[in-house]
Amino acid sequence: MTARPSSGLGDRLARYRKMAGMSAQDLSDNLGGELSRSVIANIESGRKTDITVDQMLAIAWVLDIPPVALALPLHEPFRHVQIVRGKNAYHSTTAARLIDWFLERPAMLEKQKPASPGRALVLATLKALSRYQSELRRTRLDRAKATDSERDAENERELAASRQDLLDLGVDVTEYGPFD
């Protein structure tokens, strides 16, 4: 049977909310009231299947789960999920393949296709961001350990190169405060 990705959203939300030991009211409170208890109940019952990206990210954050756990049926990996439904187009694939795509695990996909310009930019940006984050963590850890100055200088050079890679890709690397 083929279903839309939103099918089962309520069941997934209820499952992870209960695993977190929260009532619908607790979840609402932890979301700062962004979703009321009654809206959460409507999602869980299937009466409401559309939530915003902001809401999905907030719920996943509060429940301490990756957003893909809400977005797709992880527990039904072989279920067919309808991606595009339109007058002239219809595309579906298994949840497992869609999860691989969502998490950008191209080696897991059965069929590789040439990357579109947008996809190529996204992949390059993800790779550069991952490298930058790794370099930043290592630099901070080494600073905390008070390692030798030669290593510190090497870390700073690698961090600067990673930062430049991001800039070259058009990424805003401004470090904002939490409420900017």
Image (cartoon, helix red, strand yellow):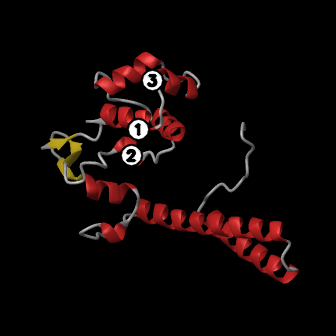
State the residue at coordinates (60%, 69%): 131
**Viewer-side label of 2, 1:** 1
Label 3 sits on a secondary structure element that is helix
Pick whichever, 45 or 134, lies toward us: 45
Q: Which residue is mark 1?
A: 16
Q: Residues within 10 Å of mark 2 (few under 14, many from 20)?
A: some
Query: Between disc 3 and disc 2, whose residue precedes?
Result: 3
Separation of marks 1 and 3 at Cα, in angstroms: 11 Å
Residue 118 in which image quadrant: bottom left
Separation of marks 3 and 2 at Cα, in angstroms: 18 Å
Q: Is residue 164 left or right of residue 45?
A: right
Asked if the residue under mark 1 is in contact with the one under mark 2, i.e. CB atoms within 8 Å, the reply is yes
Label 1 sits on a secondary structure element that is helix
State the residue at coordinates (51%, 43%): 64
Q: Which residue is mark 2?
A: 69
Identify the image quadrant of the C terminus: top right
Tag 1: amino acid: Tyr
State the residue at coordinates (31%, 49%): 74
Tag 2: amino acid: Ala
Tag 3: amino acid: Ala
Q: Position of residue 158 (x, y in %)?
A: 71, 76
Query: Between disc 2 and disc 1, whose residue precedes?
Result: 1
Label 2 sits on a secondary structure element that is helix
Which mark identifies residue 24?
3
